[in-house]
Image (cartoon, rainbow, N blue to C red):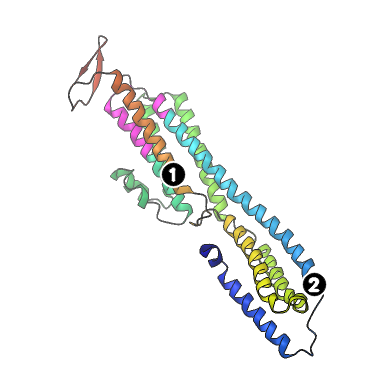
Amino acid sequence: MKYVLGKIKTELTLVILFCFAFQIFHYSFETISINIPIAIPTIIGTIISLLLAFKSNQAYDRWWEARIIWGAIVNDSRTLLRQIIIFYNDPNFSVEANDFKEKFAKRQAAWCYSLGQALREKDPIKPIRDLLDEDELRFVKKHKHVPNAILMLHAKDLKKALNADKINVYQQVEIDNTLSRLCDSMGKCERIKNTIFPTTYSMYIRFALCLFIILLPFGLINIIGWLQIPLVTTIAAAFFLIEKMAIHLQDPFENRPTDTPVSAISNTIEKNLMQMVNEYRDEFDEELPVYGAKAHHIQPLNNAYFVL
């Protein structure tokens, strides 16, 4: 309740002061008739309800679209790493291949973290320092758009793998399609972030809401007297809360409790990707006998495996 009412404390304070001032003026000048039919504020309240309902629906659509986009990012991140693990040609199960796959997984997790931070206009480098090596950090720091720079690192590693015959052309095309979908999702998030809700629409709703609150005591003063103060305050709080809810939902990347939980989603993606890499590595560790704690490479020879 503290958080919710804290969002409209200024509006509620002004409403309470207005109601008290209106009540004092009414009893100080009883000869002056200042009451109006209750039907007038009722009609205005009905119009405001329709406008707020429309705005809330539009705001929720923006919030839900953002959540759908991040759901697609989760799926495409898992797809990307699955393609890297399966497509990468490594019959010798070398440490180099494992490092390549783990590096790809960490870099993709770093992309998710940096995108979420960039959308919230926070430092995109801070949460990814432990996921990228020094050369990669040096590369992304040169770019204003860090998530796009990380996708460039993905593409460069894919080109190196293609030139080294670790993947073929068709596999490279499939992985590149996944990267393109991730880039599309990034652009969609930026479109939601940079496209503001029409300001005039919000202004008109606020103007109508203020007019309704101003007229409401005139219709209640002769009916309930002093009770109009808590009643008008309660009604005003309900309208202001609905308006504030719509304002928060229409901007899902503002680092608020009502935002799309991009940090939690990125954390889930990181856990999933690292688990995929570790499970793949453990699977072959069980199949291949490794002698010695410091074995670095396993090479097949005449249907037997020897540690080099």
Q: Which residue is mark 1?
A: 266
Q: Amino acid at mark 1?
A: Ser
**Looking at the picture, does residue 213 appear above or below residue 1?**
below
Q: Which residue is mark 2?
A: 38
* Dominant secondary structure, magenta: helix
**Residues in magenta, as a range:** 83-106
CA neighbours of label 1 inside 10 A, class few (<14), some (14 to 19), many (20+):
many
Q: How many labels were placed on the picture?
A: 2
The residue at the point 40 percent across, 40 percent down is: 270
CA neighbours of label 2 inside 10 A, class few (<14), some (14 to 19), many (20+):
some
Say if the magenta span includes residue 154: no
Q: Nearer the viewer, residue 188 or 145?
A: 188
Q: Secondary structure at mark 2?
A: loop
The residue at the point 54 percent across, 63 percent down is: 1
Say if the magenta span includes residue 89: yes
Q: Quadrant of the C terminus?
A: top left
In the rendered image, residue 15, in percent from the top left (x then y), is placed at 64, 75
Front disc: 1 or 2 = 2
